[in-house]
Each structure stands twice: as C-alpha cells, then as structure tokens.
Image (spheres, rainbow, N blue to C red):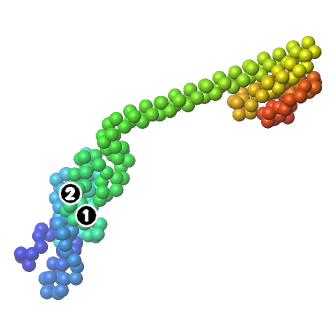
Amino acid sequence: MGSRGGAPHDMPPEQRAAITELHPGRPITVAVDGRSDIHALGLVLYRMLGGAIAIGPYPMHRIAFHRPPRVPVGLADIVAKCPAVDPRDRYADAGQLAEDLRRHPADLPLRGVSNRSLTERWRKWCRRHPHGLVRAAMTALTSSALILVAWRIARGETRRRLRGAESLLAESRKHQDRHNDPAAARALNHGLALIDQSRVRSFPTPSVFICGSLISFARRRGVSGTPPPGCRRARRSGRPGP
C-alpha cells in the first residue's frame, strides 16, 4: 500500500476506488488508465493558473472548479475538462489535451470543448482574419453602391417614359385639333406603349394621371389603341386624367 497510488487529494475517483478494493485484497472492478493522469495533470494546471482546491478528508468528493481571475474562458474550459469525475468526460488521451492547449493561443477553434464564449470566439476570429472586417465592409459598401446605381438608372428610365408619354399625349391632341386622325392615333398608340406597368410601379400618382389621360382622350376621340395592364388598372382606380 505504501508504494501504490499517489497523493490522495490528486487521485481521480476511479483510482481511489481501486486502492480501496486493493487494501482488503479484493479483485479490482474499476478501470484505471491514462485518463487518470489527465485528471492529475488538470489539477496541476488549475493550480498553476491560480485556482485553489479545498483540501478535505480522504477520500475527496467532487472538485468545485471555478475559473480563476483573468483566465480566458476557453483555457479554463480545457482545464476544467481534465479533472471530470467520470473518465469519459475527460480528454481521451494526452495528445488531445495537448492539441487544444496549442490551438487556444493560436486563436483556433477548440476541439475537445465547446467554444461557449461568443465574445472570445469573435476575438479569435478577428485575430485570425485581421483584414476580414475591412473586406466585408468593402463588399457591403460596393453592393450597396451597385444597388443604388441600378435603382437610379431604373428611376431615370421610368421618368423618361412618363415624360415621353406626356409629350405624345400633347402631340396627339394637336393632331386631333388639326383633324389629322391617323397621326393622332399613331402618337396616342405610341404613348400607350410607353406606359408599362413594370416601369411605372414606383411612380403611382404620375402613372395614374397619364394613363387616365391617354385612355380618356382615346375614348373621346375614338382613336384605336389597347392600353397595357398598368393603364387598365389605373383606369379602374377612378383617377383618370382630364
């Protein structure tokens, strides 16, 4: 008994149970493997980081683990995983523990524990991608600029069509006053063709006025022409032009 085991307060539960069975000479029914060393190493790391472990009567009960001051959450979670009561909750071997201990200062995602601190994960990502935010901001700015330019182009095209329809309406009236019905019909039909529902959707008031004017004028003068859907909808809205 004097040459087996280790410091009582650094022993994992399964090792204490095995020694308890060994003392009266009973068969050892618990498995003790390399994860017991992970338990002891975790306690050493915990003390090195400034953590305090209460020394109580042997055998020890569950260890109360508290994150030491100024210790990052990720590193504290690595250390806290080592002295877990159930060996299955610890690192499977020293290689996995060493990998996480290397990944943490390298700002890489941890493998053995969850990255539960969103703030720490964000800081690690920023350190891994120092120019990522700048590129993301430039991409967003460029996309916004392209959308604005496309909207202004579409708006300008819509205004041009509306002005053209107004001009053709006035031209059709002049031809009608001169009793030139064929020319009036051509101008009116051309004006109706300029009024397209998809083009004037963002200008409801002018489109209603111009569509109503074109349709009313065509009906009064008996000029043939088929208004597009947008004009027919404007006519039904009850807001025709003069």
Q: What's the CA distance linking mark 1 and mark 2?
A: 10 Å
Amino acid on which disc 1 is placed? Tyr
8 versus 145 height, above or below: below
Residue 167 or residue 48, whichever sits in front: 167
Residue 25 or residue 159, whichever sits in front: 159
Residue 177 or residue 26, whichever sits in front: 177
How many numbered circles are shown? 2
Going 84% across and 22% down the picture, which residue do you hit?
186
Which x, y percent locates residue 4? 9, 75
**In the rendered view of the protein, which quadrant contains the C terminus?**
top right
19 versus 241 height, above or below: below
Q: Quarter-wise, where is residue 125 in the image?
A: top left
Q: Quarter-wise, where is residue 150 in the image?
A: top right
- The secondary structure type at the circle numbered 2 is helix
Residue 110 or residue 201, whichever sits in front: 201
The residue at which mark 2 appears reads as 98
Amino acid on which disc 2 is placed? Ala
Residue at the farthest front position: 182
The residue at which mark 1 appears reads as 91
Q: Which mark is residue 144?
A: none
**In the rendered view of the protein, which quadrant contains the N terminus?**
bottom left
